[in-house]
Image: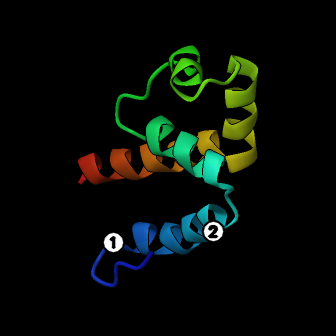
Amino acid sequence: MHAPDAPLALRTALPLADRIAGGWTKRQADVAYYMLAPDPPVQAELARQFDLTQQSVQGHVEAAGIDELREVCEVLEARKTAF
């Protein structure tokens, strides 16, 4: 991920996000696709979609660092609207 014309905060966050995403398994990437959306589904719904348990989805979310990535996105969005 690279955005040379983006604000400094985003240019700083993107390489870290790229490094994190580069270590995902296929299933973690599938779960991340939905869980990083603006309106993510509840984990039970995603579990049904992928024929997994909710606990398995939660494990993929934790292993992939989804909550941490969402937090960074929220901070960047808040910064964007603060200007």
Tell me, for residue 7, which label it has, or none: 1
**Circles 1, 2 touching at the beta carbon (< 8 Å):** no
> Which residue lies under the disc numbered 2?
22
Three-letter amino acid code of the residue under disc 2: Gly
Q: Position of residue 43 (x, y in %)?
A: 57, 21
Residue at point 70% right, 64% down? 23
Residue at point 45% right, 49% down? 73
Task: Using residue 41 as the reference point, say whether residue 17 is left or right of it.
Answer: right
Residue at point 41% right, 67% down? 10
Three-letter amino acid code of the residue under disc 1: Pro
Secondary structure, mark 2, is helix
Secondary structure, mark 1, is loop
Is residue 77 positioned above or below 3 on the image? Answer: above
Local packing at callout 1 (Cα closer than 10 Å; few below 14, some 14-19, many 20+) is: few
Is residue 75 positioned above or below 43 on the image? Answer: below
Residue in the foreground of this view, choosing between 19 and 7: 19
Residue at point 71% right, 19% down? 53
Q: Position of residue 49 (x, y in %)?
A: 50, 24
Task: Using residue 20 as the reference point, say whether residue 33 is left or right of it.
Answer: left
Is residue 49 positioned above or below 28 on the image? Answer: above
Circle nearer the N terminus (1, 2):
1
Tell me, for residue 21, which label it has, or none: none
Q: Residue furthest bottom?
A: 4
Q: Residue furthest front?
A: 51
Residue in the foreground of this view, choosing between 76 and 68: 68
Tag nearer the camera, 1 or 2: 2
Q: Quadrant of residue 4?
A: bottom left
Residue in the foreground of this view, choosing between 38 and 30: 30
Is residue 11 positioned above or below 13 on the image? Answer: below
